[in-house]
């Protein structure tokens, strides 16, 4: 097993590269667009280069699947028992909008399940991670164990929603299930981490996401006592599917 401190260090280094571009870009950030019309910045590329180079150094035999890399054909991928699944900059729209709600995400997948995960938010210098046993949050240089929070009968249910995909009719219908609810809007994989550290109870996702968007934070919430469940069959999300698109899901405290 790889030392989690090494993975945290890689995520931090990638975060520093992102912040350098974020801080020096002023009001203008150079943006290109991928085939699916999603934005791509120099920060995505810089972070991806650092993570891939460092992961290859510490784990030469473990393949890497990255949002910004070349996507290996499924006929080859399906033979992978373990692989790194990374999103070098989740929340590119948040990066462009300069609200600070973007993350670096590194996960280790084993037989379709995330077993290690690091989520680093560079602007606030907060890191959520799991070593595959327990989950932790590093804030102000201090690492503390985190766990999901089960709401009591009279609690207001805190539900996280995407800042970039607000005003979804399915979300409105979902919220009607609760008598007392507080909606917390947030960008990137931070949403999943808020459930993991007990800041929120639920995160229902009705918009499209890809495997690399959720894998690292999935590991964190899982080893904090929660999970991410496919809304169609109530089963845990799996990874390395032929189609890398996630189904609609619920990040749950149980």
Image: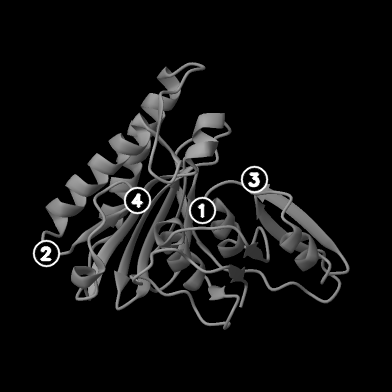
Determine whether the residue tagged by mark 4 lies in a helix, strand or loop: loop
Q: In this view, does 112 lie above or below 5?
A: below
Q: Earlier in the sequence, mark 4 or mark 2?
A: 2
Direction from residue 155 to residue 50 in the image, left or right: left
Direction from residue 59 to residue 206 in the image, left or right: right
The number of numbered badges drawn on the structure is 4
Q: Find the distance from the CA under tag 4 to the CA under tag 2.
A: 20 Å
Q: Earlier in the sequence, mark 4 or mark 3?
A: 4
Q: Find the distance from the CA under tag 4 to the CA under tag 1.
A: 14 Å
Q: Find the distance from the CA under tag 3 to the CA under tag 1.
A: 11 Å
Determine whether the residue tagged by mark 3 lies in a helix, strand or loop: loop
Q: In this view, does 134 lie above or below 53?
A: below
From the viewer's perspective, is the residue at label 4 or at label 2 nearer? 4
Determine whether the residue tagged by mark 1 lies in a helix, strand or loop: loop
- Name the residue: 25% across, 61% down: 3
**Which residue position is annotated with label 3?**
163
Residue 61 disc label? 2
Residue 67 disc label? 4
From the viewer's perspective, is the residue at label 3 or at label 1 nearer? 3
Q: Name the residue nearer the viewer: 72 or 55.
A: 72
Q: Find the distance from the CA under tag 3 to the CA under tag 2.
A: 38 Å
Q: Which of marks 1 and 2 is nearer the N terminus?
A: 2
- Name the residue: 39% across, 56% down: 118
From the viewer's perspective, is the residue at label 4 or at label 1 nearer? 4
Q: Name the residue nearer the viewer: 1 or 175.
A: 175
Residue 189 disc label? 1
């Amino acid at each position: 097993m790889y030392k989690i401190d090494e993975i945290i260090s890689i995520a931090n280094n990638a975060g520093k590269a992102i912040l350098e571009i974020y801080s020096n870009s002023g009001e203008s950030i150079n943006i290109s667009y991928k085939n699916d019309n999603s934005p791509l910045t120099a920060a995505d590329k810089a972070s991806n280069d650092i993570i891939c180079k460092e992961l290859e150094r510490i784990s030469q035999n473990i393949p890497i699947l990255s949002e910004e890399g070349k996507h290996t054909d499924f006929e080859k991928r399906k033979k992978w028992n373990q692989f790194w699944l990374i999103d070098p900059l989740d929340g590119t729209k948040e990066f462009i909008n300069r609200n600070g709600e973007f993350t670096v995400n590194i996960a280790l997948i084993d037989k379709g399940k995330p077993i290690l995960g690091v989520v680093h938010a560079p602007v606030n210098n907060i890191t959520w991670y799991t070593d595959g046993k327990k989950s932790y949050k590093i804030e102000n240089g201090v690492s503390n164990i985190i766990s999901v929070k089960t709401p009591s009968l009279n609690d207001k249910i805190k539900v996280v929603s995407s800042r970039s995909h607000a005003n979804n009719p399915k979300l409105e219908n979902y919220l009607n299930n609760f008598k007392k609810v507080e909606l917390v809007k947030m960008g990137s994989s931070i949403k999943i981490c808020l459930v993991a550290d007990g800041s929120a109870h639920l995160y229902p996702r009705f918009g499209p996401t890809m495997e690399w968007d959720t894998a690292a934070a999935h590991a964190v919430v899982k080893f904090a006592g929660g999970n991410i469940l496919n809304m169609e069959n109530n089963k845990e999300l799996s990874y390395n599917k032929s189609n890398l698109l996630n189904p609609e899901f619920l990040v749950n405290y149980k």
